[in-house]
Amino acid sequence: MINPEEFPPFVSWYERMENEYSEQIGGALLAFNKIENDVSELIGSILYQRDRMDLIKPTLNKQLSGRVDALALLLTSEPKFPRVPIARINALAGQRNNFAHSHFTFDPNTSDPITKGKGEIKRWDAADIEPFMREAHDLHSELSTLAAWVAFGPGPAPLPPGASATPTEAAQ
């Protein structure tokens, strides 16, 4: 628990807690924004490669859940494409919505910081956001790898028989 006596008198304990909450939520929203961007980049790349520029804008203008559904559908025609963690993206999106739309206040009986949202009241602790941040970072890493796979394929094409990946004396 934060000790209100640790802060200068001109910064109330409530303001300090509200600022800490704002910083944590801002960081969580920024972390999740990377995932939203990754989903959009994947969709744009796949549609561009398929010469379907006419579908890029309408697809990217959808809410995230619609874009995630579109990505899942696009990938059904890519049997070699690595699995996209659709369920994890959707789960994290739900948590993000709770963070973004909950109201921060204090319990009038205990002075504990709480959030109110969707009919629920929860005690708030900055540590509650850490698992979200880790998952957002992990998902961003995975989606970035998938974006490279879409852009460049699964790896170098096999060489024809007798070919060498390095120059030989005869070729020089």
Image: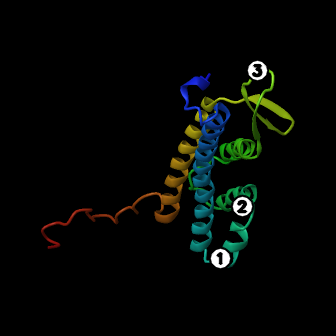
The amino acid beneath tag 2 is Ala
Residue 9 spot, x, y in % from top left: 59, 32
Q: Which mark is residue 9?
A: none
Which SS class for mark 2?
helix
**How many numbered marks have been drawn onto this rendered protein structure?**
3
What residue lies at 72% left-to-right and 68% top-to-bottom? 61
The amino acid beneath tag 3 is Thr
Residue 133 spot, x, y in % from top left: 58, 40
The nearer-to-camera label among 3 and 2 is 3
Quarter of the figure with the N terminus: top right
Q: From the viewer's perspective, is residue 153 above or below residue 30?
A: below
What residue lies at 58% left-to-right and 34% top-to-bottom? 130
**What is the CA distance from the residue labelled 3 to the residue labelled 1?**
58 Å
Which SS class for mark 3?
loop
Farthest residue, direction right: 119
Q: Quadrant of residue 112?
A: top right
Q: Earlier in the sequence, mark 3 or mark 2?
A: 2
What residue lies at 75% left-to-right and 42% top-to-bottom? 98
Q: Which residue is mark 1?
A: 52
Neighbor class of circle 3 (other Cα within 10 Å; few <14, some 14-19, many 20+) is few
Q: Earlier in the sequence, mark 3 or mark 1?
A: 1
Q: Which residue is mark 2?
A: 70
The amino acid beneath tag 1 is Arg
Neighbor class of circle 2 (other Cα within 10 Å; few <14, some 14-19, many 20+) is some
Q: Which residue is mark 3?
A: 110
Q: Quadrant of residue 171?
A: bottom left
What residue lies at 61% left-to-right and 32% top-to-bottom? 126
